[in-house]
Amino acid sequence: METRRIAVIGAGAAGSMAAIFAAEAGADTLLLERTRDGGRKILISGGGRCNILPARVDESRFVTDSSPHTLRNILRSWPLAEQIRFFEGELHLPLVEEADTAKLFPVSNRARDVRDGLLALAARRGAQLVTGSRVAAICPAGARWRVERESGAPLEVDAVIVATGGLSVPSTGSDGCGLSMLAALGHTVHPTYAALTPLVAEPAVYASLSGVSLPVSISARDGRRTATSRGGFLFTHRGYSGPSVLDVSHVLVRSRLDDGASARVHVRWTELDERQWETALRPDGTRTVAGVLRRELPERLADALAEQAGVPPTRMLSQLRRDERHRLIEQLVRGSLPWTGDEGYRKAEVTGGGVSLAEIDPRTLESRRHPGLFICGEVLDAFGPIGGYNFLWAWATGRAAGLGAARP
Ligand SMILES: Cc1cc2nc3c(=O)[nH]c(=O)nc-3n(C[C@H](O)[C@H](O)[C@H](O)COP(=O)(O)OP(=O)(O)OC[C@H]3O[C@@H](n4cnc5c(N)ncnc54)[C@H](O)[C@@H]3O)c2cc1C
């Protein structure tokens, strides 16, 4: 039997994994990458430490406009436990869980080890990495595919895997060109939007709190969509960031695109619920509002929240009126967070939307429109929350596409 020739476009997370599995399955595999090295998003991921996977997966936290059922089927093709075994066993990269966030990192805490390890394994298995090679177009050529590059002769291959990533942080090499190529081939591309991106507030009501961080529960909703998250919240000089904010940001981004920022965001600033705050704020000797709030919150935030509720922080609990206590508790457990915009793709960790999952075979990730065309990673219509979910998706879809494309 003749060896199958495969071109993988994009040596990012999904593409390098696709190349590893295609080459292992015996295909003559070319990994075409437009930058000088590839895997640049892996390098900057997790603050340079690479949050490679979540320690546990809650599939319901993925977001797609396609069928969540199809998304789950794709994810389950390479379960988390097997992915962990792959990284520790095949890549010799021991992982460790960060206890308070349930994120997995390489023990070395070096994202470079992940990127270099993947590309080295792809090479050991026989894949050939060609850097500085930007693919300009792909087109069916009889039963094969022609891959046209910006420079160099066109290539003829049996199958092509598109792993070109989304639109976020274009300096890493992914600028959405794969989405245009696939749309030109007749694929349905759900409207794209920046996701996992910080929020902006103008005027910046809380600008003086820039740098303050704390764990919160946050929810965002408009008429159509809702998202909730628990985790770190960070005040920035332009607005808000931190994992919990990023996780719900897509609802706000989309509400801006749909009808001009109609989504509302509410924050519960501490673990305490209404009843517990009622108890904590009962009249008690000479204690002040600030004194009570500062036991549970960073000092500057405690004072700012009291002021937002129209209650002077120095007010003694014994003099706190009923309506003031009510407003204060409302602010603490369901505080409305003013926002006016988002940081967009410039800072987004992923792109929402993308190629409809209905148009790919969930087992092989082969296009239902074009035999021999395989699609994986962020270019597909799915993303997950902060915590290693997006690499989980990239690894699972990359592997499935590599195996699918290598199959005779
Ligand atoms: C700052 C930041 C931090 C992140 N941290 C984490 C984290 O800790 N954990 C996590 O799970 N996720 C994280 N993510 C998300 C994660 O990086 C992405 O979900 C993942 O990299 C997507 O993989 P991909 O292979 O689909 O795309 P990419 O990794 O973006 O790879 C696409 C590749 O294709 C190449 N390419 C594009 N077009 C062409 C072309 N025409 N020809 C040739 N090559 C091309 C690009 O140069 C690039 O190398 C982070 C993202 C960012 C921006």
Image (cartoon, rainbow, N blue to C red):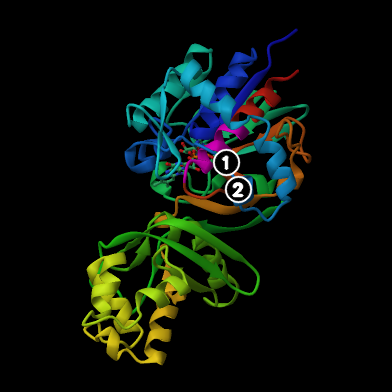
Percent of width and height locating residue 85 = 53, 21
2 part of magenta stretch: no
Q: Nearer the viewer, residue 298 or 53?
A: 298
What kind of element bears circle 2? helix
Left or right of residue 407: residue 99: left
Q: Nearer the viewer, residue 69 or 13?
A: 69
Residue on which the image places disc 1: 57
| Residue at 40% in and 91% down | 322
Does any portion of residue 338 appear in the rendered image?
A: no
Left or right of residue 25: residue 206: left
Quadrant including the C terminus: top right
Percent of width and height locating residue 189 = 67, 53
Does any portion of residue 244 appear in the rendered image?
A: yes
Residue on which the image places disc 2: 179
The residues colored magenta run 387-397
Percent of width and height locating residue 287 = 23, 79
Overall secondary structure of the magenta stretch? Answer: helix
Q: Quadrant of residue 48?
A: top left
Q: Nearer the viewer, residue 292 or 193?
A: 292
Q: Residues within 10 Å of mark 1 (few under 14, many from 20)?
A: some
Q: Quadrant of residue 101?
A: top left
Question: Residue type at mark 2?
Answer: Leu
